[in-house]
Image (spheres, rainbow, N blue to C red):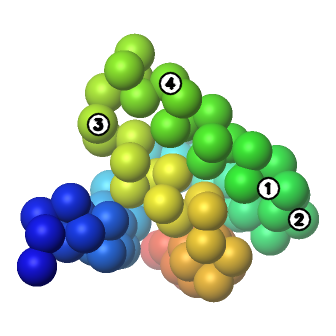
Amino acid sequence: MNHAILFLMQSPRDKWPLWAETLRRYRFAGIASWFLEAGRPLALLSAQALYVGRPFLGGGVDGLARMLESEDETRAFASFLDGAAGL
């Protein structure tokens, strides 16, 4: 299988604990969860902006952009974030 296809199929779920911890540390967990659940059209636009900005932001934004593109992944991360916020 092509390496590019494998890269695109990888889920960024392994990065969720790090993302949740970072959001909680800066006290953005609540607003991020709300944005992910209520701002679906904005999430999709944000994913596209991350792809466009990748040369300036670095390849690390790919996982976040892929998560924002998928409605199921976005909702799952919002649920994960709500659960992590209670820790």
Q: Residue at x 60, y 59 (%)?
A: 68
Secondary structure category for the residue under label 4: helix
Q: Which is closer to the viewer, label 3 or label 2?
A: 3
On the image, the x and y values in percent for residue 58 come to 31, 27
Tell me, for residue 38, which label it has, or none. Answer: 2
How many angstroms separate mark 3 from mark 2 (CA)? 27 Å
Which of pointers 3 and 2 lies earlier in the amino acid sequence? 2
- Sequence-first tag of 3 and 4: 4
Label 4, residues with CA under 10 Å away: few <14, some 14-19, many ≥20: few
Label number found at residue 35: 1
- Are the residues tagged 3 and 4 within 8 Å (C-beta)? no
* Three-letter residue code for mark 3: Gly
Task: Residue at 61%, 72% (x, y): give it.
Answer: 70
Find disc 4 in the rendering and name its residue. Answer: 53
Q: Are marks 2 and 1 in contact (CB under 8 Å)?
A: yes
User: Do labels 4 and 2 touch, CB within 8 Å?
Assistant: no
